[in-house]
Image (tube, rainbow, N blue to C red):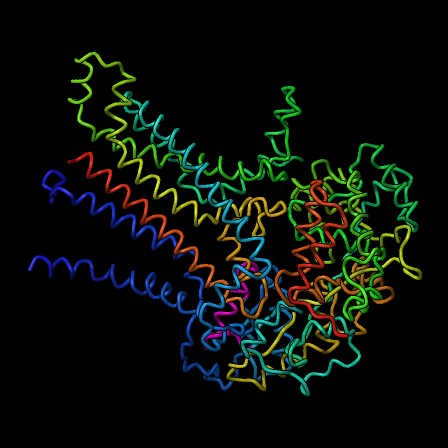
């Protein structure tokens, strides 16, 4: 049919059809993201050579070579097992894992999220409880909490690594300005002033990315609200986020804004890291997971870390603290065809042998107690946490519902830096937000 | 017989449409009416998941704000994209020699993924290393060197303007085709009767372009209400800074994949259904109005 011979009205109909289809397809963007129905697979994972193949899924694409090396060692000690390691893009992983665990083509041993973000997977009954099979006695309780179901208190995974947050600093820039890592709040402020006077941005912060701000708050003011002591009081209901010490800790971040890059809410975290790596900024609050990124960005720079000293007015007995949490946990899928072999693999992950490989090959601080990182900075972070650690409270205890504590504080701190809210308002919003789902234990 | 042959030809497309469009849509509708524990479906929940969207944090604060941004995005895109698109198409129409090349140039950004566009503009507008602010400072306009994506007052307009910049080729092409369909004898007759160029455009060409304007408007509405990639590239899934670039699709993404809530599938499916109803209802109503107008001008 040529255009000329098209009957009257057909273009109108065609347009209507096009618009309807466009509307339908448009909505597909949001509706298509649904869990898959269970498929069936007759794959047993047993190869012709009688070996059992265990599939391990992870979101750490960058660690694939290290994991393959680690699992090669496991295969040597367990000749009847093949470990097939598959890594997926971190930002897509939650979706891929939910789909994989709902069907039967998922992994035997998935890497799972920790604390609150583990609960959806637990509620789906996708994981095998590991109580009585893996022994986590003697492990840090804050680390063990990452692996548990909130409702039933059972252990569903083995923690892989401890992450800590602290202040990174450029030792060369500090020395050039006659500074050393501060041990008192006054020294800290004096160092900031001196660096600013020398034309260096003292503290690189990427406040455009809200997720970084609760970390910045922990690094700068963890001791101002009382760290670990505050955790037990807020969880029992004795205190809330409107407590004067918490409000003052939020204010500390606002008071230090003058030492951050200009227009800090427009600065992305990657820009902040670039400022630090380009030696235009002297300090950057960050996680242990940032270390390798910072080292690779400027291999010639001598990086040090320190705990920010307690701000004036900190609760009595409060000392500088290093906040931490566990992540990268591994679990056993409830649909695994080889639950015994899969459980044996995650049990091996509690061994010092595996822990040492996590330190040396994956370059993370192993969650296994008594294992020392070989990298001196990682060791310092690990020692700081062991000696004066506290939980990264909003992650370890306030991500069990929506809105999460980290989301609320991230947004609130942005509002404070933009001047639309004060510390009391930010703290009030955090308190109101988490109370929609959080119930104190007492 | 012809009808049956036709059906054979469209069957593969229909099958694909049914499997990849209809089936996920219908299942998502059904998910919205159940309780969920992770990926395990629980009991029938009636309208509870929809009630949640209007009564529970963070939806009570985030949903109105996100929806407002979608509407603002639609209005901004609509006004700027349609006006500039039509102007450019009209100017190109009177320059047949360079039309093809310029149309292609205008459509170029359209071929690049919105995620890439967003990333590139984030780099260009960075207050620390971005060339835009460096240039403004160098030419003495330091007060104009704003934290474009760091200030809620400017961030949403950056999203709108970059989107217009990327998609301007689309209305240019559509209006270009529609202008070609306006019979020349009508404008010539008007000129013979003494009409100026301006009068001929506003009294003859523009009214005949209304169906095309309507089509562009409806497609822009659908596009704006489901906006995801560009806002995500600019402000992440939380609509940084402080929710200033939050959109309903981002809220859906956060609820479904980032919240960690055990009932995420129920509430996110309800949100997807609500968004679908808004898009479908809006598009249907606009198309109905458009048809009425078409009937009037063709009668």
Q: Is residue B72 left or right of residue B132?
A: left
Q: Quadrant of residue A268?
A: top right
Q: In the image, residue A298 lies at what x, y percent?
A: 72, 45
For residue A359, say whether it is visible: no
Q: Nearer the viewer, residue A330 or A245?
A: A245
A404 is within the stretch colored magenta: no
Q: Quadrant of the N terminus of chain A?
A: top left
The quarter of the picture where the C terminus of chain A appears is: bottom right
Whether residue A322 sits left or right of residue B78 in the image: it is right
Q: How many marks?
A: 0
- Placement of B134 over or under A28, stated as above or below: above
The correct choice, above or below, for A184 with respect to A55 in the image is above
Magenta-drawn segment: A87-108
In this view, the residue in front, A242 or B214, is A242
Q: Considering depth in this image, is A133 or A212 the residue closer to the camera?
A: A212
Q: Residue at x 84, y 62 (%)?
A: A384
- Percent position of residue A292, x then y: 70, 54
Q: Is residue A193 visible?
A: yes
Residue at (71%, 45%) from the top-left corner? A421
User: B224 left or right of B147?
Assistant: left
Report whether A116 appears left or right of A314.
left
Q: Is residue A105 magenta?
A: yes
Nearer to us in this view, B219 or A352: B219
Is B40 drawn above or below residue B160 in the view shown?
A: below
Question: Residue A410 placed where, x, y %?
Answer: 68, 52
Residue reaching furthest top?
A: B194
């Amino acid at each position: 049919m040529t255009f000329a011979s098209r009957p009257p009205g057909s273009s109108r109909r065609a347009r209507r059809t096009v618009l309807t289809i466009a509307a339908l397809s448009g909505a597909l963007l949001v509706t298509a993201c649904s869990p898959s129905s269970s498929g069936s697979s007759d794959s047993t994972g047993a190869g012709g050579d009688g070996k059992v193949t265990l599939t391990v899924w992870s979101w750490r694409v960058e660690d694939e070579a290290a994991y393959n090396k680690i699992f090669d060692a496991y295969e040597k000690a367990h000749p009847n097992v093949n470990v097939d390691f598959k890594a997926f893009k971190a930002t897509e992983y939650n979706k891929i894992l939910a789909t994989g665990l709902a069907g039967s083509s998922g992994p035997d041993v998935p890497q799972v999220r920790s604390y609150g973000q583990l609960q959806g997977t637990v509620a789906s009954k996708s994981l095998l409880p590991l109580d009585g099979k893996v022994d986590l006695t003697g492990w840090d309780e804050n680390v063990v909490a990452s692996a548990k179901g909130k409702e039933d208190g059972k252990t569903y995974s083995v923690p892989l690594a401890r992450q800590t947050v602290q202040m990174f600093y450029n030792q060369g820039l500090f020395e050039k300005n006659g500074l050393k890592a501060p041990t008192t709040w006054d020294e800290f402020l004096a160092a900031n002033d001196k660096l600013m006077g020398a034309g260096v941005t003292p503290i690189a912060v990427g406040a455009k990315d809200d997720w970084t701000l609760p970390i910045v708050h922990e690094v700068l003011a963890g001791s101002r609200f009382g760290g670990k002591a505050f955790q037990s009081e807020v969880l029992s209901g004795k205190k809330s986020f409107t407590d004067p010490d918490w409000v003052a800790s939020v204010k500390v971040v606002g008071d230090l804004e003058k030492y951050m890059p200009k227009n800090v809410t427009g600065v992305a975290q990657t820009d902040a890291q670039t400022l630090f790596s380009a030696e235009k900024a002297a300090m950057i609050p960050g996680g242990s997971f940032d270390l390798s990124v910072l080292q690779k960005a400027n291999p010639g720079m001598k990086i040090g870390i320190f705990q920010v000293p307690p701000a004036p007015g900190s609760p009595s007995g409060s000392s500088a603290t290093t906040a931490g949490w566990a992540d990268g946990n591994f679990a056993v899928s409830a649909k695994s065809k080889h639950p015994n072999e899969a459980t044996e693999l995650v049990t091996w992950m509690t061994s010092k042998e595996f822990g040492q490989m996590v330190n040396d090959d994956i370059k993370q601080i192993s969650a296994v107690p008594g294992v020392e990182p070989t990298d001196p900075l990682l060791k310092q972070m690990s020692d700081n946490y062991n000696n004066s650690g506290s939980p990264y409270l909003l992650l370890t205890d306030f991500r069990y519902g929506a809105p999460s504590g980290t989301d609320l504080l991230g947004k609130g701190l942005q509002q404070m830096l933009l001047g639309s809210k004060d510390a009391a308002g930010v703290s009030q919003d955090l308190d109101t937000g988490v109370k929609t789902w959080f119930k104190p234990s007492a | 017989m012809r009808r049956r042959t036709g059906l054979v030809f469209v069957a593969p497309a229909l099958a694909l449409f049914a499997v990849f469009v209809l089936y996920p849509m219908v299942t998502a509708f059904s998910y919205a009416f159940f309780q969920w524990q992770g990926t395990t479906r629980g009991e029938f929940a009636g309208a509870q998941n929809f009630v949640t969207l209007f009564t529970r944090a963070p939806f009570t604060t985030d949903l109105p704000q996100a929806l407002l941004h979608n509407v603002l995005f639609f209005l901004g895109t609509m006004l700027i994209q349609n006006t500039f698109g039509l102007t450019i198409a009209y100017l190109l129409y009177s320059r047949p020699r360079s039309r093809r090349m310029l149309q292609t140039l205008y459509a170029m950004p359209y071929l690049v993924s919105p995620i890439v566009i967003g990333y590139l503009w984030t780099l260009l507008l960075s207050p620390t290393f971005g060339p835009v602010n460096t240039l403004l400072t160098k030419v003495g306009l330091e007060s104009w060197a704003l934290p474009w994506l760091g200030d809620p007052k400017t961030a949403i307009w950056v999203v709108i303007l970059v989107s217009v910049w990327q998609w301007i080729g689309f209305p240019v092409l559509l209006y270009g085709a529609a202008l070609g369909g306006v019979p020349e004898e009508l404008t010539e007759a008007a000129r013979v009767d003494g009409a100026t160029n301006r009068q001929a455009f506003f009294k003859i060409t523009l009214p005949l372009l209304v169906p095309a304007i309507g089509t562009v408007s409806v497609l822009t509405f659908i596009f704006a209400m489901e906006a995801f990639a560009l806002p995500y590239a600019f402000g992440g899934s939380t609509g940084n800074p402080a929710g200033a670039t939050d959109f309903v699709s981002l809220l859906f993404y956060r609820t479904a994949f980032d919240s960690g809530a055990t009932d995420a599938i129920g509430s996110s499916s309800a949100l997807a259904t609500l968004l679908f109803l808004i898009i479908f209802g809006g598009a249907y109503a606009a198309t109905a109005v458009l048809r009425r107008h078409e009937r009037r001008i063709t009668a």
